[in-house]
Amino acid sequence: MRKRSLIALATGATALGAAAFGYASLIERNLFTLRRFDVPVLQPDAEPLRILHLSDLHMMPDQRRKQAWVAALGGTDPDLVVVTGDNMSAPDAVPGVLRALDPFLDVPGAFVFGSNDYRGPVWKNPLEYVFGKREYVQGVDLPHDDLRAAFADAGWADLNNARTVLKAGGRSIELAGVDDPHVDRDDYPSVAGPVDTGVDLHIGVTHTPASRVLDPMAADGFDLLLAGHTHGGQVCVPGYGALTTNCDLPHSMAKGLHRWPGTDAWLHVSAGLGTHPTAPIRFACRPEATVLTLIPR
């Protein structure tokens, strides 16, 4: 009887695991979700301002459903669009990215790149994200210059180790950003310095929410910090949350809106809309875009 019970238990566990994997790979990774947060960073009596935050599309050319879903977000009527990198997962993905973002290319926008805008993904052991440091391996070159040119032609601000002021929603917005810290392309010191107090709003932008970037941005007075990279953990434990952020960000901040510890700055980390193509699963962490409605403090 005991042997039969163990066999039954093992069979049940195998079936449950297979069902969970099937759900994560076939269903949840396609359950695109729009999140909404109010962020109290504006001056008293200021009119609200809407930011659409998009991240980690990891676009493949044939992902038409994802492209259509993102394009439909034009109905959110954002004042500003901010894209925080990892747009591509294949050398021929630029047209798909632009199909998805086409409704926003006449809206004020800004972007930084992630490592998967420069080099394609390669297979990795997913357990390495959870159990110890892994060596970063880069794949084929991706056409980042083509994507950069398309965004720049639309008038979007390139914030890869750059700083600028733009107009959106009738407000002046100071933005500073870095190239991806995950592959040591960041150079915040080249754009560092106290914010311009004559500007209405100050936003810091990075792909990877690394503390070595977020700490000085917050110290310089940026009101809102935007990042992606974490995929929200991608595979989470219900009731517990993310097992990894793939950087030094605390697991409790793997996605969503939080105060950056010890500062007045708000941090929003997008769980992103895509997955690494060699691990196309999500569990208890739906793919997402976010509308951040900035309101008076």
Image (cartoon, helix red, strand yellow):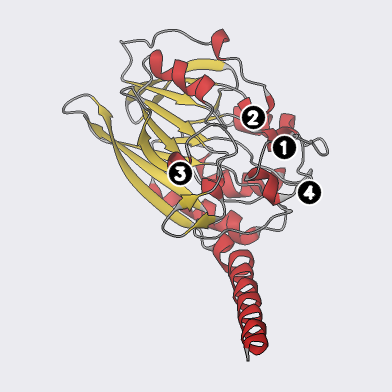
Image x and y of residue 81, in percent: 47, 36
| Amino acid residing under circle 2 | His
Q: Residue furthest front?
A: 2
Q: How far separated are the C-alphas under marks 3 and 2?
A: 17 Å
Image side of residue 38 versus residue 89, left or right: left
Q: How far separated are the C-alphas under marks 4 and 1?
A: 12 Å
Q: Secondary structure at mark 2?
A: helix
Q: Please tell me the numbered disc located at residue 182.
A: 2
| Quadrant in which the C terminus appears | top left
Image x and y of residue 270, in percent: 48, 42
Q: Secondary structure at mark 1?
A: loop
Report the residue marked by disc 4.
Answer: 123
Q: How far separated are the C-alphas under marks 1 and 2?
A: 12 Å
Report the residue marked by disc 1.
Answer: 134
N-term mark: 4 or 3: 4
Above/below status of 179 relative to 57: above
